[in-house]
Image (cartoon, rainbow, N blue to C red):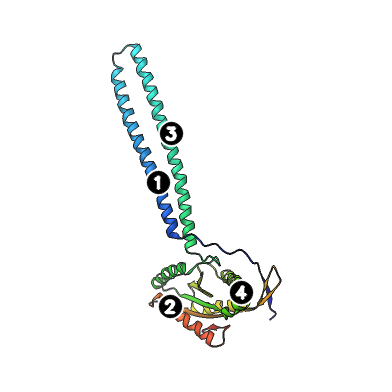
Amino acid sequence: MNERGVSLTEGPATPAAPSLDGTLSSVGKRFDDILARLSAETGEAQKESSAYKKILEGVGADLINKTNEVLVEQLLLLRKETQRHAERLARLEAELAHSDDELTSLRHALRQARHEAETDALTGIANRRSFDGQLAEMMQEAAVTREPLSLILLDIDHFKRFNDTHGHKAGDLVLRLVASRLSDMVKGRDLVARYGGEEFIILLPQTHLEGGRILAEKIRAGVAANQIIIKRTGRSLGTVTLSIGVAQYDGSESAEGFVERADAQLYLAKSSGRNRVMPK
């Protein structure tokens, strides 16, 4: 098979994402401020309503057996107080609308913070934290439904040597390339995550071991067939290969035990010569 070229574009360093704790603290403070403002506005509106009610009751009592002059005076007072009350309600309505906009902004900030907390900054795929959470949920689901659940654990072969030869910037580009290839080859609820360093992991719900093994082999062959070229300079970095381990959840083991079995298969792939999938 002829090797295909894959061009990589060098980009700026990825800035560190703000911490979820910091965002939650900021959102909490803004939320407290909104509640305080709303509480103050509604308190004033309640006072105004109570005063307005008393005025209405007083005017109603005064209108009985009064002269036209007194009647006009009372009606003018009623109009004035009605206008004041309407203005207070308008201010409250505006404050509620403003607060609703702020709450929408806070919800967006929380969603963004949650996304950043669960995303690997370098590759843009799920991080270890996100994977751990999804693994726990899918294992619980598989135990109840008796549906199969498999995972693929893979490692870029000789990645340290690649970094030492071509530099860490080129190594980062390769990590992005592998992450992109993995994401392109999964579907549905499958989850691709960076597990740590040059290790990636794929969670495959409703997939038997054989299905996971077939996908792993496609991934291995697809990555190995590509010549990596830096687009800006045309410089070739050669090829990279993957060693891959696959395991299927047995329905009762711990998350740690499940991943360890895939890791044992990955170790076997490495010790057997690398650039291969285990079990065969």
Identify the secondary structure beneath mark 2. Answer: helix
Please give the residue where the numbered disc 4 appears in the rendered image. 167
On screen, 210 above or below 46? below
Q: How far apart are marks 1 and 3 (CA)?
A: 21 Å
Q: What residue type is labelled 4?
A: Gly
User: What residue type is disc 2 on?
Assistant: Phe
Question: Which one is earlier in the sequence, the residue at label 3 or at label 4?
Answer: 3
Q: Which of marks 2 and 4 is in front?
A: 4
Q: Is the residue marked by circle 4 packed among few (<14), some (14-19), or many (20+) residues within 10 Å?
A: few
Using the numbered discs, state the Cα–Cα distance from disc 3 to disc 4 in whole angstroms.
63 Å
- Which one is in front, 19 or 105? 19
* Amino acid on which disc 3 is placed: Ala
Mark 1 lies on residue? 33
Q: Which of marks 3 and 4 is in front?
A: 4
Most foreground residue, 182 or 101 = 101
Label 1 crowd (10 A; few <14 / some 14-19 / many >=20):
few
x and y, in percent, of residue 83 in the image: 41, 26
Q: What residue type is labelled 1?
A: Asp
Residue at image point 35% right, 18% down: 74
